[in-house]
Each structure stands twice: as C-alpha cells, then as structure tokens.
Image (spheres, helix red, strand yellow):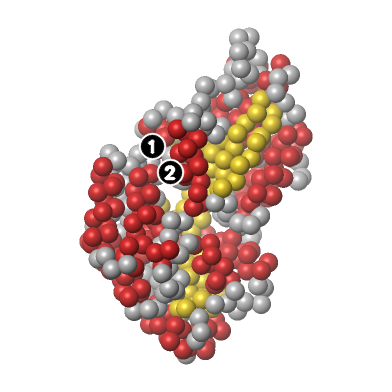
C-alpha cells in the first residue's frame, strides 16, 4: 500500500506528542514514555465485522503496513459476521476482554457505562478535525465524541432489467404500490422472486428503517426511541402485505441480507435494497448482470433512504494502550490509507480529505445523491442497542402470522425497558 508524507508526519507527530505530554501506554511504565520510545511491545486486540468477502484481507493489508512502520505495536485482528459480532463482543465484555479497537454500530450504551475512551484520547486533533462535521457530531454522547466515523452509506433500489422485461414491467417503481405490483409481476411471470426482504438477525433493523423512512418515520432520537408510531405502523403493515401477497422470497423472517443480495447478484431476484459495495460485487461475481440503480421506493415517491454510519471506537480498559490506539487511528485515517480502504469496500468517506480524493468516482454518485435525504439509526441513545437487538429477533414475526402492531409494540417494550 502506498505510503504518504502525511501518514509519516502523523506517525512522527503523534509519537512526539506522546513524549511531550508523558502519556505512557506500556504496562507498569511509571516514567510516562510511550511503548515505542521505551522499546516495549504493545498488542492491540481489534474486532471488526465483515462488509464484503475482501474485508479480512483488506484489514490485514492495512495492519501489515502499519506494523512495518510501527514495529513495537502488534495488532491482533478478529473478523466476525454482522450476525455474530454483537454476541462476540458481549461475551468479551462479560469476560473483561474488551477489544482495544472495535468496528461497530451502536456506541452510546458503552459510553454511558464509561467503557469507551473519548476520541480525543485515541486520535490526534488533526485526525478529528478532518471528519465532516455532521458525522463527527453523530459520534457524541453528552457532548463528548467517542466514535470515529468509519464509513457512510445509503441504500438504493437495485433492479434486474431482464426480469422486469420478462414480466412486462416497463417502469422502475418509485412508490410502494408500484414496487408491490412490479414485484408481483416478476414473481408470477418469471422463475425469480420479485422483492427481497431480509428480516433475519443480520439486518432486520436496516430493512425496517428503509420502509419506515419511506413514510416519514424513524426510530426516534437521542432522547426517545419511537418504534410503534403511526407512520412506522403503516409502513410495517405494507411490508406485511408484500409478504402475505407472495411477492417476496420465502420465509423473510429467516432471510439474511448477505445471501439475499447474493441471490440478486446471481440474477434470481427482481428488486432489492443494496449498498454501494454491491456494485463492486456485481462487477466481480456477475459482470453480465443487466441491472440498474434507483432511489428508494416510498409511499408517495418522495425521496428518503436509510443512512448508515459505522464507526471505530476504543474500549479503554485500563487506559494503558490509548497511545498505541492513537498511532493506529492516525495512520488509518491518513488520506491515502483511508481512501484505499473505503473505496475498495465501496463505501462513502466520512473525512473531508477522503471526500475530496474520491469526488470523481461515478460509482458512488447515486448514493452520494441520496445521502441528503437519509435517516440514520439513533445510535446516540443508550437504549438503541436493546432496540437494535429487538428488531433483529422480533421483526421477522410479521412473516409468521403476528400483526404489525403486535410486533412493533413488542419491540417498543424492549426499548422502553432499556431506559
């Protein structure tokens, strides 16, 4: 991976700052020197999810290059699926083995429990200033920033042109009713399913928020989780209608996003909400797929979508490794290293320097256009972790006979109990 003057300067300046401020991170080091200055070995435990089939190799490349430039810091990488990572983290926390670096979604609950290091302890002022303000503000709990925004993303409607033609669907749907009718035509007239609705434990909350946002709904804010609102209920009832009318794949409640998107990539699904990196997967796995990308279909056709902003954070543990974490974060968010990572994964950058560097990427343009109308998870609410878990375990029940009202009320109860 290409090295830049900026990354070298960041590494040197961070090390110099550690010496000047006497912030040590080697165990039992009372002199205050950094591990690198003392010659000690510091090992960082890093837990991350899988964004694509290349995620593990991509992180390994970053870590190898980082360790070459920082021989006294070792990074142990652990990669888990999105379906499993939260349970893995929970087990580690229960065993007092919190990762030093964690890539995840919700963070406010951890901040409320004083488990996370403030961002200012694990990233330089230069790195923090490079984040776009809107994303940096979303990483704050009680006015203190804890997360470092890793990626931005939005969902768009991917559609199979060949299946639409075979089913006699002439126009790309822009409303719920149009999406329903187009999906039904594909289900009835082709061998493919019309619409992919993943309500399994991988990302039921994401699929739900796409639909809720399409009716002016959301999951609430930093002060209150709001699930069973009239707008959300109407959206959930239409989701159930899609299922009951047979226009989705079989058993949506057990369907995970990743295999569902693989079905679309294989040309066996008419419509699906997908991410920027899905474009890269199609190029790699089925470049002949005749598909298009459009805005999310909403109740009235007004623009709305799910926005995602995952983050890197650091569990502070005993505080002895904060300087080493700062070395890693400053290195990773340097322009060349970060943009290589984010563009390879197919996401949108959260830094000013990254946005400038990737401004001409036409692949990202449809998603960048959708971001202004994106609705995000209320990750700054400490009850979001419980709400997120409730969506993943309960939302699929709308496909098994329960009413949308019953399901949303049950999720709301979980959220209220977590206050």
Q: Nearer the viewer, residue 379 or 298?
A: 379
Whether residue 132 sits left or right of residue 380 in the image: it is: right
Q: Nearer the viewer, residue 94 or 22?
A: 94
Q: Secondary structure at mark 2?
A: loop
Residue at numbered disc 1? 109
Quarter of the image where one finds residue 44: top right
Residue at x-position 47% and y-position 67%:
273
Q: Which mark is residue 106?
A: 2
How far from the left and from the top, in percent, is residue 46? Answer: 59, 37
- Is residue 315 at all visible to an observer of this figure? no
Alpha carbon separation for disc pair 1 and 2: 7 Å
Whether residue 410 sits left or right of residue 86 in the image: it is: left
Quarter of the image where one finds residue 304: bottom left
Whether residue 88 sits left or right of residue 182 in the image: it is: right
* 401, above or below 358, in the image: below
Classify mark 1: residues with Cα within 10 Å, few (<14), some (14-19) or many (20+). many
* 397, above or below 94, in the image: below
Residue at x-position 46% and y-position 44%:
87
């Amino acid at each position: 991976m290409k090295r830049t003057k900026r990354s070298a300067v960041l590494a040197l300046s961070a090390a110099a700052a550690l010496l000047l401020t006497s912030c040590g991170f080697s165990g039992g080091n009372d002199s205050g020197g950094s591990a690198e200055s003392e010659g000690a070995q510091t090992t960082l435990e890093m837990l991350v999810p899988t964004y694509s089939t290349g995620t593990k190799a991509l992180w390994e490349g970053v870590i190898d290059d980082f360790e070459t430039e920082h021989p006294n810091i070792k990074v142990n990488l652990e990669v888990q699926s999105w379906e499993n990572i939260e349970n893995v983290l929970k087990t580690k926390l229960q065993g007092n083995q919190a990762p030093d670096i964690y890539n995840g979604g919700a963070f406010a609950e951890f901040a409320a429990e004083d488990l996370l290091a403030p961002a200012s302890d694990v990233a330089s002022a230069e790195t923090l200033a490079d984040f776009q303000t809107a994303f940096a503000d979303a990483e704050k709990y009680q006015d203190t920033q804890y997360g470092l925004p890793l990626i931005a993303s939005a969902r768009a409607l991917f559609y199979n042109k060949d299946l639409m033609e075979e089913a006699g669907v002439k126009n790309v749907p822009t409303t719920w009713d149009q999406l329903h009718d187009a999906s039904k035509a594909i289900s009835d007239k082709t061998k493919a399913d019309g619409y992919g609705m993943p309500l399994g434990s991988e990302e039921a909350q994401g699929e739900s928020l796409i639909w809720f946002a399409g009716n002016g709904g959301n999951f609430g804010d930093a002060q209150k989780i709001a699930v069973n609102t009239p707008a959300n209920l109407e959206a959930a009832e239409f989701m159930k209608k899609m299922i009951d009318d047979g226009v989705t794949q079989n058993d949506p409640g057990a369907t995970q996003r990743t295999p569902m998107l693989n079905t679309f990539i294989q040309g066996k699904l008419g419509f699906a909400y997908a991410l920027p990196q899905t474009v890269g997967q199609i190029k790699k796995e089925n470049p002949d797929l005749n598909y298009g990308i459009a805005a999310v279909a909403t109740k009235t056709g007004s623009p709305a979508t799910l926005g995602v902003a995952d983050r890197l954070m650091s569990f502070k543990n005993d505080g002895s490794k904060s300087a080493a974490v700062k070395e890693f974060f400053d290195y990773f968010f340097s322009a060349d290293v970060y943009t290589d990572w984010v563009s390879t994964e197919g996401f949108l950058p959260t830094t000013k320097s990254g946005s400038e560097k990737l401004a001409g990427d036409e692949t990202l343009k449809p998603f960048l256009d959708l971001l202004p109308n994106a609705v995000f998870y209320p990750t700054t609410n400490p009850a979001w972790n419980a709400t997120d878990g409730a969506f993943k375990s309960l939302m699929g029940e709308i496909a098994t006979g329960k009413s949308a009202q019953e399901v949303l009320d049950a999720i709301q109860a979980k959220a209220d109990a977590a206050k």
